[in-house]
Image (cartoon, grey):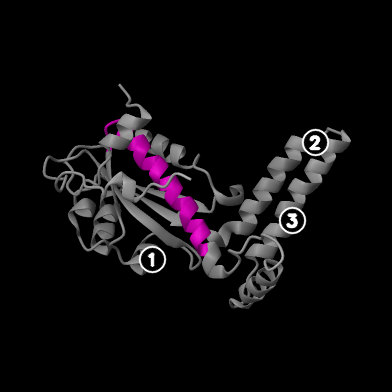
Amino acid sequence: MEKTVTEAIAHRRAIRVFENTPLDPAQVRDCIRNGALAPTSSNLQLWEFIHITDPQTLGALSKCCFDQNAAKTAQQVVVVVARRDLWRRRARANLGFLDSQFEGNTDEKWQRRRKMALNYYRKLIPTLYTEFLGLLGVIRYVFFWLVGLFRPIYRQVRKSDLRIVAHKSAALAAENFMISMAAIDYDTCPMEGFDSLRVKKLLKLPMGAEINMVIGCGIRNEKGVYGPRFRVPFEQVYRHI
């Protein structure tokens, strides 16, 4: 029986050693689909999920991950990629969807909402994401900072800020995926120890793509949990105002 959300969160651990037990690729794919339902900044969905089941590619990827056990024993691997470079394509996809939603409705209030929504993707998103050698980001930062002297304003407008935004969205999707895997008794291990350049080369990713995390997948071996779970006292990380 599939676990509840709370049960899946409690069950999920970073498993360092997996059993030599095959996983159903279709079930893993369904969990990736759940990952793609995660919240994402401006609904741009600047992510990509590369699902690897080919043994030869898994072996090559393990070497890129320094042959750590979580990579070496993984039955499948999911590589979560931040794709800030796809912002134009994703903005066009949103525009097409919004046009279809507003089509045929001539109500004045509805048309005002349509104009606001379409301008968001036609004007605001290009203003934020268009870049030239990092210079436009600096200009945006100074302009928004000056405006911010007089009223609240969005300030994450530099290239480095927007990279963080894309990675935050990708990480949310990765967590959705891992919780979904835990719900069906499949285990995962998110890895940050890898040679990102070699991983990109292996997966034939473009220069603008950035590896968010590499997730080993399998069935946990009893030696795969490295000790009991430790968290600092909840009172140290929780504030109620």
Dot 2 or dot 1, earlier in sequence: 2
Q: Over which residues does the magenta segment extend?
A: 163-186
Identify the residue at image location x=19%, y=58%: 68
Mark 2 — residue?
A: 103
Q: Are marks 2 and 3 in contact (CB under 8 Å)?
A: no
Marks 3/1: CA–CA distance: 33 Å
Q: Which mark is residue 122?
A: 3
Identify the residue at image location x=67%, y=58%: 125
Q: Position of residue 94 (x, y in %)?
A: 66, 46
In the rendered image of this protein, does residue 197 appear above or below residue 115? below
- At label 1, the amino acid type is Lys
Q: Which mark is residue 201?
A: 1
Q: Position of residue 120 (x, y in %)?
A: 72, 52
Dot 2 or dot 3, earlier in sequence: 2
Q: Are marks 3 and 1 in contact (CB under 8 Å)?
A: no
Q: Residue furthest left?
A: 223
